[in-house]
């Protein structure tokens, strides 16, 4: 078992570990810029929304990627976080592209602030809550 945090390389090792955690999380995680465009999308999120890869979604807004789906309320929740700097939650129900059954989702939005305290993005973490 390796201990990345205490190896030489300091920030580089920590950055690698954060990248791995983001990519490997079983939570659906994505990062948006202030225009609600995808900057990062983990594998779990790609699978849940029917994307073949992270690259297929980068730079797009959810409403652009899936115009046939109603992602406007989802984007509105993320936009509210950008405007207020306060966390928010969104609940949705529907069939994602590439899926055969509708699912219930709960997504938590957190503001991402720069060193000056300005909101520069939004982190979204979602859970499939269909069974609940």
Image (cartoon, rainbow, N blue to C red):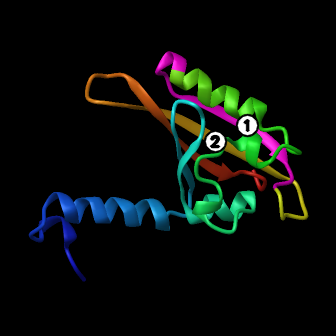
Disc number at residue 56?
A: none
Image quarter where the N terminus lies is bottom left
Residue farthest top in this picture:
84
Q: Quadrant of residue 27?
A: bottom right
Q: Is residue 47 above or below residue 132?
A: below
Specify which label sits upstream in the sequence, 1 or 2.
1
Q: Secondary structure at mark 2?
A: strand
Q: Do tag 1 and tag 2 residues touch (Cβ < 8 Å)?
A: yes
In screen coordinates, is 3 left or right of 26?
left
Chain part drawn in magenta: 83-96
Work out how far the residue at label 1 is from the one at label 2, CA to CA, in angstroms.
6 Å
Q: Where does the image place residue 100, in percent across and percent down from the top left?
A: 90, 64
Residue farthest bottom in this picture:
1
Q: What residue would you read off at disc 2?
A: 107
What crowding class fits label 2: few (fewer than 14 Cα within 10 Å), some (14-19), or many (20 or more)? many
Q: Where does the image place residue 23, in percent across and percent down from the top left?
A: 48, 64
Number of numbered discs on residues = 2
Magenta highlight on residue 106: no
Q: What residue would you read off at disc 1?
A: 91
In screen coordinates, is 80 left or right of 20?
right
Q: Residue at x 76, y 39 (%)?
A: 63
In screen coordinates, is 13 left or right of 37?
left
Q: Residue at x 58, y 52 (%)?
A: 58
25 vs 114, nearest the viewer: 114
What crowding class fits label 1: few (fewer than 14 Cα within 10 Å), some (14-19), or many (20 or more)? some
Q: Secondary structure at mark 1?
A: strand
Q: Residue at x 59, y 47 (%)?
A: 59
Q: Residue at x 69, y 26 (%)?
A: 76
Q: Quadrant of residue 35?
A: top right
Q: Where does the image place residue 83, in percent across and percent down from the top left?
A: 53, 17
Q: Is residue 43 above or below residue 31?
A: below
């Amino acid at each position: 078992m390796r201990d990345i945090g205490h190896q030489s390389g300091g920030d580089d090792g920590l950055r690698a570990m954060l990248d791995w955690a983001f990519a490997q999380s079983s939570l659906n995680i994505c990062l948006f810029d202030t225009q609600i465009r995808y900057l990062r999308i983990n594998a779990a999120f790609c699978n849940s929304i029917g994307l073949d890869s992270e690259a297929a979604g980068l730079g797009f807004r959810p409403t652009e990627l899936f115009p046939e789906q109603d992602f406007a309320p989802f984007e509105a929740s993320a936009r509210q976080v950008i405007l207020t700097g306060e966390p928010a939650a969104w609940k949705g129900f529907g069939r994602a592209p590439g899926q055969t059954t509708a699912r219930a989702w709960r997504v938590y939005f957190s503001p991402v602030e720069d060193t000056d305290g300005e909101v520069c993005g939004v982190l979204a973490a979602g859970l499939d809550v269909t069974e609940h």
